[in-house]
Every structure is written in structure tokens, then in C-alpha cells.
Amino acid sequence: MRIGAKLAKRLANTCQKVSWLMLFISALGISAYSFSALAQTASALHDPKLAARINGAPLYILTLDVMTRMAQLSHPKISRTVVLESLIANRLLAQAARSDFAQYHLTTANRVGFAPEVALDDQLSGTLRTVYRDQIETSIKTLAGGNLNALVLEQGKLSTAELDLVFGPGDKLLLDYNLNPAQLAMAKRLIVLRSSLPSTPRISLYAIFIRQNVQGRVEFFNRNRDFMRQQAVLYLGNLYLQEWARQHFGAAALADLRQALAEQSEVHALMSLHGIGADIDAESKLLNALAAQVTQAEVLSYFQSHKEEFKRIISVKARHIRLADEASARQVIAAANQGASFTQLAQRYSTAADARQGGDLGLIEHTEKLSWLAELAFIQDEGKVSAPFRAAVGPKEEAYWEVMLVEKRQEGYQDPASETVRYQAGRALAQEKAIKQISVLRQQLLKNAKIDINRQALN
């Protein structure tokens, strides 16, 4: 089996671009000047392997190179200076997030999805493949056969008895596809693949089982040996990419890139927690807490300065025509659109009780409970004959169609004391406060940190 194409496809699916970076910058109101100002005021650094030091800890050139290339895939004009400050800010924000926001979930639950470390591992390999595709392909071509199969020395046998020791009886109905400690220990002893890769001469059943989401674990419990071996080969390809990078850039630089990708995900979660990149209805414990603290005076002030957000239709004057089938409804619509009087059409064709009155529904006011016909009137454009609508009838009721014409509608505003206004204004104010919080935190972290920058790395 050739694994180059399959590996590339999987890595492409897991590789994330950093387009949210520009959203972050825009949301916080950060100017391009602030980035250049940091580069000018930070202490000078002359280590050719490093782009910066943050409170004494290194940030490698490799990380800046790779993250700049990734950012430029979606924002070609983004500068290395902007990306570098983002990396610096991410490192500081991620550290703060782990301590200051520990009560909030900054990672997604992974009972159904992949474990965070597995997702990060795939993202690292996918990023390397994206940025260094040509160099990696050249390296692979030097292997026997010109593909990664040359690394496979032997496929494991995986007998039924051995798999039963790990996964239990094959005919047992399961509700949970996890292994207990004893089963995991047994899985570590079973070899799925032996390789010539010096860093990983053997790939155990355990090593690939823990890399699966729930669908993958089901295949393991179903004793799908081909799937297990395929996953082992894909994992081997992952390991080869990282080994290639380790040899070219060094273990410390590769670890730093991995850390930067992890920090990017943590900060992305932190941004979502603060409402950046999410709508006001997005679930966030932090936004919920801030919204609960919003006062009625703040709600009223927001309402006065954002009244257009609370505009609504308070009443409509409408007419309708009820018809037995859709074809008849479309014929009436065509006649109305050609200039025929809607009132006269209603008097002639409508089967409703108000046909003699030209289908006059009178003035319909916006109350808490509206009939489906009244609701239909509220969503129509003024002066425009509607499309035909099938009535909401029961299964044993005869169907019919309605055609609507709103002659006039009156707009107004929601009651500023209503629960709807409080909810919408409260969420919007909470989001504003949260974004301000994270912006202030970011600026404070950058201000208080000791940052050394290799200015040559910005060219």
C-alpha cells in the first residue's frame, strides 16, 4: 500500500491555518504600529537560531518561519513582525489562561473526538508537510521504492487470542469502547508493525489505539486488522515527518513549534471564551457571568445607543386569498403581478369566509400568540404579493394554499424593559467587556514581560 497520498490527505485535513489571527487583531483594535513598536523597544538578540526570548525562554526561528508561511496562505501581506508578536502574545496568554482561566474549559471534550495530544501531533505533521512539502518529498524519494513503505520491516500477526485478551470476547455487546489499565498494558505488548525508523523500531497496538476517535476504536473492537495496520502505517508516516524535521532543525526547535501550535489552540479557545469570533448567543461561562452582572441602567443606555438593533414590526394591514391547490394559487399570483386588483381576485377566487371583504385581515398587531396566517403576514414585504404557502393543517384535514399581500406595516421598537431587550443588550455588553478584558490582559502581559528580539529574523 502506498501511504504518501493517504498521509497527505489526512494531514491536510488536520492542518489549521491561522486566519483567526487577523480576527484577533481586528477585534482587539491593535494597530500595525504596536507591532513595530515592540520590535523597536525590545532588547536585541543575536542568537541565529532564535527569533526571540520571552522571559528568558527561547522562541525559535523555525517557529517564526513556519507560522509566517502558514499565516501568509490566507493573508499574503502579513509581515513577520506581526506574526512574531502574535507568537509572543500567544505564549504569554496561554500561560495566563492555564492559571487565570483554569475554571473554564479551554480544550474540547474528546470522548467522541481525538485526544488533544493526538490532534496536536497530526497538526504538527500537517503543518510541516504544508511548509516543507518539496523537501520532504525529495527525502522520501531517496527511500527504497521512493515511498514510506520502505520503513516497514514487518507487519504484526495479531492473533485472535491476543486481541481477545485486549478487547474481550468478540460477541459481547458494548456501550463503551475504552480499555481498562490491564487491557492497555496488554495492548502495549502487542506489536502491529516493526520499522527501520531509529526513533520508533516498533509500533504497538497501544500506540495506535490511543490515537483513535470513537469510530476508530469501534474498528479496533471489531478486530479490523487491516484498519489497525493502516493506522500503524499512517502513524509511521507522521513519525517520519517529525524525524525529518528533527534532523534538519533540531529537537528543541521542533518542540518549540509544537508548543506554538498548542498555544495557538489554547489562545483560540481563550478568544472564543471572551466572545471573539463568536455570536452573542454562543455558550460561554465567562460571558454568562458577565451578562448576569449587567445592570438595567447599562441595558437602557445600550438600548438608546443601539435602537436599530431592537427595531420590530408592531402591526401590519394585510389581505389574503385562500385557494384549494397550488396551481390555482400561482394563477392568482400571476394575475396580481400583471396588475389585477388583489381585492377583486380575493372576492372572485378566495374560499375563505372573508372573501366578500376582499380577504381583508384588518390590522394585525404583534402579540405574544399569533396564528400561522398572522405570522405569515409579519414576514412579508410591504406591497409585494407573496409566494403560495401551504396551510399548516392536520393529517386528516384537507390542504389549502394561502396568498398574502401586506398593504402597510408599521415599525417600532421593542420595549426597553422587556426580557428580550435585557438578554440581547446584556449579551452584547458582556461580549464588549470580555473583549476589553482580554485586550487589557494582552497589553499588560506584553508590557510586563522581558522580551528580546532577533531583529535580523524580521527581514
Image (tube, rainbow, N blue to C red):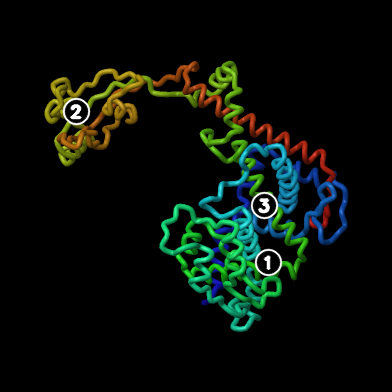
Nearest to the observer: residue 213 or residue 418: 213
Return the disc, 3 or 2, that comes first in the chain's sequence: 3
Q: Kindly identify the residue that appears in the image at 63 percent across and 76 percent down.
A: 195
Left or right of 330 in this view: 124 = right
Q: Residues within 10 Å of mark 2 (few under 14, many from 20)?
A: few
- How much space separates mark 3 and mark 2, taking CA atoms? 66 Å
Left or right of 31 in this view: 293 = left
Q: Amino acid at mark 2?
A: Ser
Mark number displayed over residue 401: none
x then y, percent, for residue 80 = 73, 53
Q: Amino acid at mark 1?
A: Gln
Q: Amino acid at mark 3?
A: Ala
Per the image, label 2 sits on a secondary structure element best described as loop
Q: Kindly identify the residue that appears in the image at 35 percent across and 19 percent down.
A: 367
Q: Which residue is mark 1?
A: 242
Q: Which residue is mark 2?
A: 341
x then y, percent, for residue 254 = 73, 62
Q: Kindly identify the residue that appears in the image at 55 percent across and 28 percent down.
A: 427
Mark number displayed over residue 262: 3
Return the disc, 1 or 2, that comes first in the chain's sequence: 1
